[in-house]
Image (cartoon, rainbow, N blue to C red):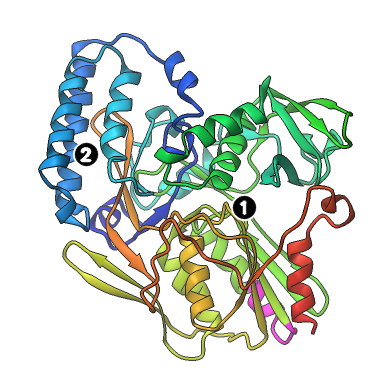
Amino acid sequence: MSRRMLEAGFVWAVVLVWFGATASPVRAADRDDIAKGSTSRDSAELARDLDSFDFVRKTIEDRYPKPERLDDAWQGTADSLRRELEASGSKAEARRLVTALALSFGESHFAIIPSDAYGKLYEDEDDTAEADAADAPSSEGSVGLDVRWIGDALVAVRTDKGSSAEKSGIVPGDEVISIDGRTTRDLAETLREDSSESVSRFETSIAMVAQRRLTGKLGEEREVVLCRQPGDTIRVALAIEPWRGTPTKLGALPEQTVETFSEDLGDAGIFGFSMFLSPMTVMPVAQSAFESFHGKKGIIIDLRGNFGGLMPMIQGIVGWLVSEPTQLGHMVMRDADLKLFANPRPPHFGGKVAILTDELSISAAELFTAGVQEAGLARVFGGRTAGLALPANVVRLPNGDGFMFVVAEYTTPKEVRLERTGVVPDVEVSFSRFDLYENPDPVLDAALAWIRE
């Protein structure tokens, strides 16, 4: 997919990127990190930051789907922020001001992606970019631990096989007390105080921030303190290890790593993937799953922790579930009114379909889930999705940062708006952290019980 196609709007990259200063959920929690990055800069750098601010403003004025909100008050805010930027004394301060302009509508999918999040800068963003990215190993990774907020605690819900988290003995149900000395209670308090400024609800915000703190440069370690039983503590040093999955580069987005899995469960099958990105990685796994699980009682699509991606991939995967053209959604852009359809593709799966979701099912994962749920194609199990669901585009700014901006309003065929609300599961599965010691995946078990009825 060429950069020209991306910028022309033929591909809607509905991606929520998880880097530190990218979106409002991490803004308050990482103010200390931003402050550490404050350094003086020269006039040429200031000029690039001013050009970037003007680019962001002009893009919003030209592309934001609700021009009525670009009123005198918003223009006054933009003028005020630019004057502050002219007097700013550091790159970090300038980025904060450009971010403030991008976030001024209080909606998801407006963000500034810091240039250092890109790792290396890909000058050649043509059709070979994905292959080039695959040949360039990332210098970053994670400890292989997934966490979520359950009840009143941050809890381990999954460890990658063979990861430092698994080798350390962490199991689903363990409470995470602190990460590198920062207590999760303190992190939660900070995020709750800032909830009025955040597009995201608390459960999504803290899971995103905690997951980011469990990543880093290869060779680093993260000291994690856990609790299994009241009064007991476990202290482990977790090594940052390479990302698992396929590295992918698309247009102006930083490199992403896409994970996939598929498993035969006897009378049902399950497959999942971490993002709706890298069609060459995800689509063969999905097709293989629909082919190999054909004739089974049901299929489970696990979208927990799926951060979104490309809208055409939604249509492609739903094609295996429909026997006739089916509308999945409705997009209203500045100069276009579009309806999103999925067309049938073999092999058509005729059994039961279950979708698994949680508070980190974001963006394209929400659009996919809402579309199949409303069309009666699947039953949804788990937790409510993030409610960060607006189609967006990403471009590079003159100062090297990325700019993500909303290009359309999106509703389901029944005109239900997903932004802030998210998708409510048909079966909400609630559990405590102690339940996970007996059953590490109650959501999957609920879906399997329905399929096997």
**Residue shown at 63%/60% (left/top)?**
383
Vertical side of 362 occupied by 27: above or below: above
Label number found at residue 56: 2
Specify the farthest residue to the left. 72
Q: Is residue 380 part of the magenta span, yes or no?
A: no
Q: Position of residue 344 (x, y in %)?
A: 48, 85
Magenta region: 288-297
Label number found at residue 274: none
Label 1's element? loop
Which quadrant: the N terminus? bottom left
Which quadrant: the C terminus? bottom right
**Residue shown at 89%/36% (left/top)?**
229
Vertical side of 118 occupied by 159: above or below: below
Q: Amino acid at mark 2?
A: Val
In this orientation, which residue lies closer to the viewer: 255 or 33?
33
Residue 390, quarter of picture: bottom left
Q: Amino acid at mark 1?
A: Glu
Between discs 2 and 1, the one toward the N terminus: 2
Per the image, the residue denoted by label 1 is: 259
In this orientation, which residue lies closer to the viewer: 15 or 97?
97
Q: Position of residue 93 (x, y in %)?
A: 31, 19
**Residue shown at 35%/20% (left/top)?**
92
Q: Foreground mark, 2 or 1?
A: 2
Q: Residues within 10 Å of mark 2 (few under 14, many from 20)?
A: many
Q: Position of residue 159 (x, y in %)?
A: 76, 44
Label 2's element? helix
Task: Give the spatial CA distance, label 2 vs label 1.
Answer: 32 Å
Confirm or deny contact between disc 2 and disc 1 (CB under 8 A).
no
